[in-house]
Amino acid sequence: MAKLYFYYSAMNAGKSTTLLQASYNYQERGMQTILFAPKIDQRFGNTIIYSRIGLKQEAVPFDDQLNFFEYVEERTNTMSNLKCVLVDEAHFLNKKQVSELSDIATELGIAVLCYGLRSDFLGEPFEGSKYLLTWAEELTEIKTICQCGRKGIMNMRIDSEGNPVTKGAQVQIGGNESYVSLCMKCYKNKVNKQEEITV
Ligand SMILES: [Zn+2]
């Protein structure tokens, strides 16, 4: 039975790589997939998901207006073997869109795999992740390691000198250069002490 899945992690844990591998596994078996990525991610152009280890695949850009259910239902007219929908940076979804994705699994019988962060750089939950953590039928953590060796769960935004940034907009796209994944203990230490971070 098709389900809604949420693969969550901190920054730089290899979410896009895992997504692209999952899509490839379906395609290798002759099944079709649709990939979605947020429009706001302009780093590599609008519609390609790149992983840091060199994989890439075209994606449908989404903004907060896209109705995922209507879009995917329409595509089933021409994609007779559509078995899986994959969403990169799924923390940027809104509540309504998470509900639509859930409907894709339960009503259309198509698996939905979402990949995203749990919290922003201030430790606050993203709207998409809040509802994915609540409504996804399967939750899987993609683990990453803090500089101290513990599991990294927090995303710290850092400035060009490596100092923690504790104010600013929730959305600021960046990779290694502007974020570092830390365990809770190191995150608190750095925020409290404003220690210099070694990236
Ligand atoms: Zn740590």
Image (cartoon, helix red, strand yellow):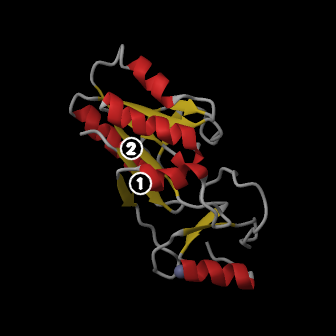
- Disc 2 marks a residue whose amino acid type is Leu
Q: Is residue 84 visible?
A: no
Quarter of the rendering occupied by the N terminus: top left
Give the camera-side residue of 139 and 47.
139
Instruction: Determine whether label 2 and label 1 are within 8 Å by CB.
Output: yes
Give the camera-side residue of 50 and 74.
74
- Disc 1 marks a residue whose amino acid type is Tyr
Q: Is residue 14 left or right of residue 43?
A: left
Q: Is residue 172 visible?
A: yes
Residue 29, quarter of the rendered image: top left
Q: On residue 113, which mark appears?
A: 2
**Looking at this rendering, what residue extends furthest in the right direction?**
167
Quarter of the rendering occupied by the C terminus: bottom right
Residue 2 location (% of width, % of height): 28, 39
- Is the shortest distance between ligand 1 and the CB of mark 1 under 8 Å? no
Residue 182 location (% of width, % of height): 56, 73
**Looking at this rendering, what residue extends furthest in the left direction?**
29
What's the CA distance linking mark 2 and mark 1? 7 Å
Residue 43 location (% of width, % of height): 63, 42
- Residue at the image position 46 percent from the left and 28 percent from the top: 69
Query: In the picture shown, does residue 158 fall above or below 91?
Result: below
SS class, disc 1: strand
Q: Which residue is mark 1?
A: 7
Q: Is residue 73 left or right of residue 12?
A: left
- Residue at the image position 72 percent from the left and 83 percent from the top: 192
SS class, disc 2: strand
Residue 34 location (% of width, % of height): 41, 30
Residue 96, quarter of the rendered image: top right
Query: In the picture shown, does residue 61 fall above or below 135?
Result: above
